[in-house]
Image (spheres, rainbow, N blue to C red):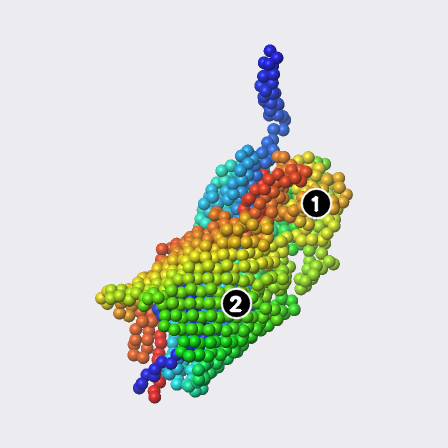
Amino acid sequence: LIRLDEVVITHTRLQNYAAGHYILPVDTLTSRLASMTNAAELMRKFGYGHIRSYGVGGVTTPSFRGTGASHTAVLWNGINIISPLNGQSDLSLLPVTFIDDIQLQSGGSASLYGSGAIGGTLQFNNKARFGQGLNVSLTENIGSFKTFFHGLSATWSGKKWISSTRLFQNAAENNFTFINRNVAPAREETRKHNAFNQHGLLQQNYFQVNQKQLLSLRFWYQDNHVEIPEPTTVARAGTSTQRDQFFRSMIGWNYDYNGGHLFVQSAHVHHLLDYRNPATNYASANTFDSFINTFENTLSIGNALEWTSGVNNTFESAIGEEFGSSPDRNRVALYTAFKHESGKFKNVLSARQETVNGKLTPFAPSLGVDYKILHWLSLFGSVSHNYRIPTFNDLYWNDALSKGNPDLKMETSWSEEMGMKLSVPTKLFNVTGQLALFSNQVDNMIYWGQTAGIWSPDNVRKAWTRGIESTGTLRKTIGKVAGQVTARYSYTLATTEAVYDPTKVNQIGNQLVFTPRHESGTTLRLRWKSFDLSLTNNYTGSQYTDDGNTSYLALKSYNVTNIWLSREFALNKLTILFMTELNNIFNNEVNTRPAYPLPLRNFKAGITIRFNKPIKI
Amino acid sequence: MKTNLLRSIPKLFFVWLLLAAQACGNDPDPVIPAGADGFFVVNEGAFNGSNTSISFYDRETGVMTNDVFASTNKRPLGDQAQSITVFEDKAYIVVQHSAKIEIIDADDYTSIKTITEGIESPRYFLGISSTKGYLSDWGQFGDEGTVKVIDLTNFTVIKTISTGQGANRMIRKGDDVYVANNGGFGNDNKISIIDTNKDEVTSTITVGDNPNSLQFDKDGNLWVASAGKFVYNDDFTAIDHAKSTKSTLSKIGSDNKEALRLTFPILEYPGAAQLEINKAGDRLFVNYNRGVYAIPTSATTIPTTPLIDKAFYGLAVDPFNDNIIGGEVLDFASPDKIYIYNSAGTLQKEIVVGIAPNGIGFK
């Protein structure tokens, strides 16, 4: 019985072209602890970037470096899964078990990832590992407020074939207790109409045709039902529900030839967003379809230079009562990137030019440099020009009280950053760290506002977000205990620099809403034998909720502390992971949006059993 | 001597003033006009934004203090305050989307009581007696209309009177309360009359579509502003003129019969609203077509041009000095301003308040 060497073909392609950026690595233990939940919870609990959230199960979107929900590109195996309807991707719809590799990168990179990659990029990738044999895993998790997670995955990984099936169901009543301070005297109440239920299937098949060719086939189906609660200031329970049902399929072909690599991918996304309120007889069901085709070639030129160029065609269409005559758009993007790696330098120069229905988007160039100045210290820097095309809602939405604006301009941005990464291994301890100074000027930002009772979007302001992102980790082993402390801090000054409506000039200089200036976090980890103890504390500074920066309307700062105890051990052919989690251990009253509370102290426990039967040769 | 006499003039003047003031004090009708102390501003906030607030303007100091409820009581006011009414020594804040009334001391803003029981989607409060108040209510989904009778001795809802759909502003004359049924989230065209002795609807008056506000003039006529109906075609691409109706202004005589109905010239959204009247009771003011229109009670047509060419959300006429106060709303995303005009429509002052000032409560 011989265990084959692990073959990992990631083909996350453009990831290799990340240079000059601040990267937030997600380590194995973190993804393991978060495996019984979704990407939103992972980011919230472990402090990856800033997220904006309506609570557990509620819509959660990333906000990198003071930018908005639609300013972060969210990619699954290279395709952008941002909804063309609302420009967002709800991170609570991304089960961590469906993802093998998570990359969180701050900063603009539209040259590589296209429209919307202004504040950051989230990449969720699957990996093909050949020769692993049979792997079956079962996950069961139970938590407070009738929270359940069931996961099952089965993978056959041979020398040439992989077939992998993953299933999950995640549901919660979410009927937690909160303190209603909206009435006198304050009273304990139960959160109502706050349940969610998600289930999904991810099927992957890989075929290693020969040493040079890999075929990949992926299919992701998910159905999500969520009850939309009212803010706690509203007396009656909510009655609205939202259903997100999507089908994402992709087929890919990788071909290695002498001195180069060819990548061809074709993907289709179908997404239904069904929002309804039976109490008011309101129903709005919209679907969109995206066909995404990529053809990309990478050439190695000598030892140091690599040149990738590609063409991407995305055809998007929407159907729904509010979209009238089913608008669509055809997007063609040409992109190219040069990577030069030699000795201490890694330089990437890239550019993208896209057309939307024949109309040119702004040219998006980018330059990034990593420079290893000392064996323990690297410097990095980048500058990029980025853009975002308006969403279908922005352009075409039409109902009694809301009207899209077909004359919207695209948002554009210049983003710059510089920083350092350090890694200091000594005999006593090991320190790693990262620090970046960033600046991002976003112009023609699109917001919805009302005139005479009718809501409509417009290019409202130019904003300048700048600040610091930093993280540092110290690792030390004392006797049988391995310890690790990570500290994070970010400062974000995100101000309005110009407004295009003279009635709003008094907003110039004000901080953008829901953008805390200060955020920090600490993670402590201890490992003893097969036991892991993790403790995180995340601090979110106060946030303005109005464009006027009115202090009495600001959302208070908050702290949330969570603790995990887990144990992973082998038992015959089984690997067993026990996990318990205590959230908000100090019972802090936290509102992530005004009148949208997080649960008080709550509990989760789970088990994952993995069975592995290696291949016999 | 001459100089002494001249020097006495100011003294004599003050003596005269004192005597005059004394005379006023002895007047058979010693009512201090509402608004003498100042006024509250209701800042509605964004729907589901939990950012509604109350401001108070002190007439003596000329200072506007924002957020008086939350800063005094250390808790949020709630979601979407619709109105504030000062009655006796208390202010009744009707918080529609929070389905409650917050009753505060009108002088120091401290919370006296929160009423939630028996309230669904409340709009306006009207004090009837020291022991009784009326509260108009749209019903949970804005498709009903009731007036809740509140016992002011223990602050409980003791009776619910069905009116039309979307019971909105109320006004009192003698033993009768007139309720404008503005349709809520639907449509209605009736004024309900409630006998305050029986707490029952005794009759109704049909007016133009969706009556929302009402005033009595100096001759005892009731004036009613109705928004009309603004109906789109099925795919919301055009206005369905056949199903829409223009805003109207009805005059109802003391016989409770509609004597006159003036139709506004242009079909527009949100239609005529916030009918106000001056102290003398002979000049009406109304928000319409992004302006404030002044309409004499002798009018037989709607003026073609507004007195104030500015769109307001809230509108009030100061009973103390006849100033016109307009509350502007930009986009429910930042604090807005109120604009104070004299009765000729000349701007006197702009003051920053909270988000979306939708009304004024005079103290």
Residue B155 in sight from this viewpoint:
no
Residue drawn at (52%, 46%) of the image: B53
Mark 1 or mark 2: which is in front?
A: 2
Mark 2 — on which chain does it sit?
A: A
Chain that bears disc 1: B
Amino acid at pointer 1 = Pro
Q: What residue is rendered at 48% in x and 67% in y?
A: A366
The residue at which mark 2 appears reads as A364
Q: Residues within 10 Å of mark 1 (few under 14, many from 20)?
A: many
User: The N terminus of chain A is located in which quarter?
Assistant: bottom left
Callout 2: few (<14), some (14-19), or many (20+) C-alpha neighbours within 10 Å?
many
Looking at the image, which residue is at 68% across and 50% down? B289
**How many labels, in total?**
2
Q: Amino acid at mark 2?
A: Ala
Q: Is residue A390 above or below residue B344?
A: below
Which residue appears farthest toward the top when viewing the image? Answer: B1
Which residue is nearer to you in this view: A185 or A41? Answer: A41
Q: Position of residue A389 (x, y in %)?
A: 56, 65
**Residue B83 location, x and y as percent?**
58, 45
